[in-house]
Amino acid sequence: MGSVAGDAARLAYPTARRDDSVVDDYHGVQIPDPYRWLEDPDSEETKEFVAKQAELAETVLAGCLDRENLRREVTRLFDHPRHGAPFRRGNKYFHFHNSGLQAQSVLYMQDHLDGEAEVLLDPNTLSKDGTIALSTYSISEDGKYIAYGLSESGSDWVSIHVMSVADKQPMPDKLSWVKFSSISWTHDGKGFFYGRYPAPREGGELDAGTETNINLNHQIYYHVLGSDQSEDILCWKDPEHPKYTFGASVTEDGQYIILGTYDGCDPVNKLYYCKIASLPRGIEGFRESEEMLPFVKLIDNFDAQYQVVANDGDEFTFLTNKNAPRNKLVRVNIKNPELWTDVLPEHEKDVLESADAVNNNQLLVCYMSDVKHILQIRDISTGNLIHQLPLEIGSVSEISCRREDKEVFIGFTSFLSPGIIYRCNLAPTIPEMKMFREISVPGFDRTSFQVKQVFVSSKDGAKIPMFIMSKKDINLDGSHPTLLYGYGGFNISITPSFSVGRVVLCKNMGFVVCVANIRGGGEYGEDWHKAGALAMKQNCFDDFAACAEFLISGGYTSSRRLCIEGGSNGGLLVAASINQRPDLFGCALAHVGVMDMLRFHKFTIGHAWTTDYGCSDKEEEFQWLIKYSPLHNVRRPWEQSSGDHSQYPATMLLTADHDDRVVPLHSLKLLATLQHVLCTSTEDSLQTNPIIGRIDRKSGHGAGRPTQKMIDEAADRYSFMAKMLGAQWTE
């Protein structure tokens, strides 16, 4: 570590202007915000700051000797064919495929599963650098048309286009300013529902994805095939609640439009319906009308989540967490909405993740048990168990089926399985589950690795699951470089999945790679989520620290050789953790993190996160947020303690110029603050570990990134980590 510290001590950090006149009053508390100017992405001063930080990062990365080794090996392992599960529309099958190093996966179609596949839609032809990605798509019921959404440079903004499937000819349709939207066709093939916002800025050219304007007034439209977007039919809006978002979908039998209303990110929604046959002039009859579609209110409050599983006419089956934090299935006749019955009651321990109607009168049910998936076939009318499907320990990554299908396709992955597509025939009494395709990674021998799950006691005694992957039979002598990953928010579960980058770390650098399933996620249902949200958010940081301490006390690693990593809400987790426990880690990688907990709700879709975090506009919630907000809790450790750990770990903040989910200003403001407080504002600073930012161009929050960008980022962040932890490359 000595040479690393010596190199870092000579880093010349760029000076960022501090404007001490910017002070906000939060309920009588004065909070300075000296880098407020970094909130303007278009200012020359911000652009100069970004350029200087990029130059500094490249200087540090150029000294990371294993950067090219990592790039070469990650590229080599990435270069293998990958397939998605096939699905059927009309008389054709469709599936995604990537030959290995293609920037984006390609959509293929074929007449039957053994037939020759032909390209339907190749996003790689749309840009030279692979930064135009397919973000959503829907094929009409008869298989004649595909409507698909394209995203540029990683932005959440989407433009929807339409293509004729038979001749692959583009239609003139183009829909703009679409965001957080699915595409759902009516069964007559005349058009589809989608969600959009008003254009974020009037006049002038806009590089969509770089703006920070708050997203308000989401609306649902119906687009008639072949018409101009200006003629689209407004189906739903709610100007009295500008922060609501909506989703519209057509039921599988084509009879109903289901409208979901969402306020923030909590797993709760309102649910309305409209019977298409009840519209005397059809949906198009509303084109000249000032009225919206006559939706009937089935659920008109935000007390629980309701997802349609199936319907037989007026009788609907829903997956819900109503009085069931681990979810259950319920049934109601929408003409008699007072009478609800349980079909599949809440499990005493496991979380009901999904349920799909298959084989006419059956359900394919997926449970999560201690962060591992279980698949069952059940009776749709009674919920009774018919058969449990054989599945290794791991995650169900996708399920491809429709109610009429006697065969389903199931995608599976785990830490040591790059991916298997199973083909399951439900016609026989005992379902036949066979391997349809298995993804194989050249040079990867799963038998030389081991994965185990442990349960760590947190500060308050809660048991936190953690997966640990390493080479087989390692000595627990505290010597291993270790990577600890976490998320802990928004009811999202981090289940086992395959990662080329992590495999390379274990295989070539002797790393132990760990995933902590801390509170705030959905691993044990809504109670687990709520235990890490709002006033309870500190539990997330305590859980993460407990997992780190377990790895040290268990002989896996030492604090100097331990790196923590997380993205988005996980970026917040990492940044808060190094503020609270700088002594516990040797390195930190925080991707696209929410760093300013007092102002996050003012930008793009940030207001939706107040359901998990709270909002500084409310005094009680301000008091929660100010205690852990990464931007507002940077301290000089050497002024609080003595000893050789009295500095921050080596830290890389990663963001991207088109991230319009967690806008880059979060990372930029924290980067300026860390460098000022720890490195440039005091002559007697003990901070020799580097604090740098990796700011990607033509990239966003993460979705749709081309393969080369993923490889380059893995090489950069992991070579930085390897050098900071003193890890050695072995072939």
Image: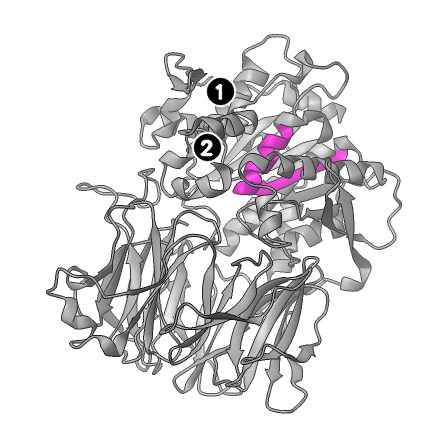
Q: Residue at x 66, y 45 (%)?
A: 518
Please name the residue that numbered disc 1 is placed on.
Answer: 14
Q: Is residue 363 left or right of residue 154?
A: right
How many labels were placed on the picture? 2
Image quadrant containing the N terminus:
top right
Q: For the stretch drawn in magenta, what is the main secondary structure?
A: helix
| Badge 2 amino acid | His
Please name the residue that numbered disc 2 is placed on.
Answer: 666
| Badge 1 amino acid | Pro
Scheme by which the image is coloured: one colour
Instruction: Let me know if residue 7 appears in the view.
Output: yes
* Looking at the image, residue 369 lies above or below residue 651: below
Q: Position of residue 547 (x, y in %)?
A: 74, 40
Instruction: Let me know if residue 84 appears in the view.
Output: no
Q: Nearer the viewer, residue 710 or 467?
A: 467
Q: Is residue 171 left or right of residue 401?
A: left
- In magenta, the rendered stretch is 561-578
Label 1, label 2: how far apart the Cα atoms are:
18 Å
Q: Residue at x 54, y 50 (%)?
A: 710
Quadrant housing residue 484: top right
Disc 1 is placed on an element classified as loop
Quadrant housing residue 395: bottom right
Disc 2 is placed on an element classified as helix
